[in-house]
Amino acid sequence: MKLIPIKGGADHFLDLSNAPMFFEIVKMTFDFYKRVGFTEPWIGYFAKKNGDFVGTGGFKGKPVNGTIEIAYGTFDAFQNKGVGSEICRLLVEIAQSTDPTLKITARTLPEENFSTKILKKNRFIFSGTVQDPEDGEVWEWVYAPEAG
């Protein structure tokens, strides 16, 4: 799998225009950059595997106080095939190779679901319930390589 940075203009992604939700994802990502800034590698990515665009992933802005938050999603046709787990793993690799001292976090709905399984599989541990300004009450997870 390869993560392809979402940057430049929408015309850079014309070959992706048949990907599910393409235009919505690009617009949301560029709107997000306007709010939080654009600092590579702390950006959004399309995930491509075996020639198919299978999902998205990224960081919710640049690190703050030594902490970075990841987020990811799988396109419907590729769910339950390990794609989300692979995107999660690649985001962790980007964070660790950029700054190995970072605390890597992720947030989920406050219930057991596919995302919590993905995080557990990728050595994240539940750290508690927090209030997210955009999502309300969520569960926070922290990457703990020793948990694997």
Image: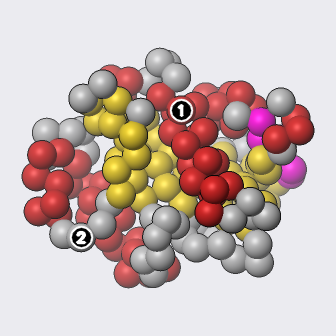
Q: Residue at x 70, y 34 (%)?
A: 122
Q: Residue at x 46, y 70 (%)?
A: 40
Q: Nearer the viewer, residue 111 or 27?
A: 27
Which quadrant is the N terminus positioned in? top left
Q: Quadrant of residue 10?
A: bottom left
21 w.r.t. 74: above or below: below
Residue 11 locus on image (x, y percent): 11, 62
Q: Which residues are magenta?
A: 123-128
Q: How many marks?
A: 2
Q: Secondary structure at mark 1?
A: helix
Horizontally, is 126 left or right of 112 in the view? right
Mark carried by residue 144: none
Going from the N terminus, do you reach mark 2 or mark 1 first? 2
Mark carried by residue 8: 2
Looking at numbered disc 1 in the image, what kind of residue is underneath it? Glu
Residue denoted by label 1: 86
63 w.r.t. 26: above or below: below
Q: Residue furthest top?
A: 81
- Evaluate whether residue 122 shows in this view: yes
79 w.r.t. 115: above or below: above
Q: Quadrant of residue 43?
A: bottom left
Which quadrant is the C terminus positioned in? top right
Q: How many neighbours does mark 1 have within 10 angstroms: few (below 14), some (14-19), or many (20 or more)?
A: some
Q: Residue at x 53, y 32 (%)?
A: 86
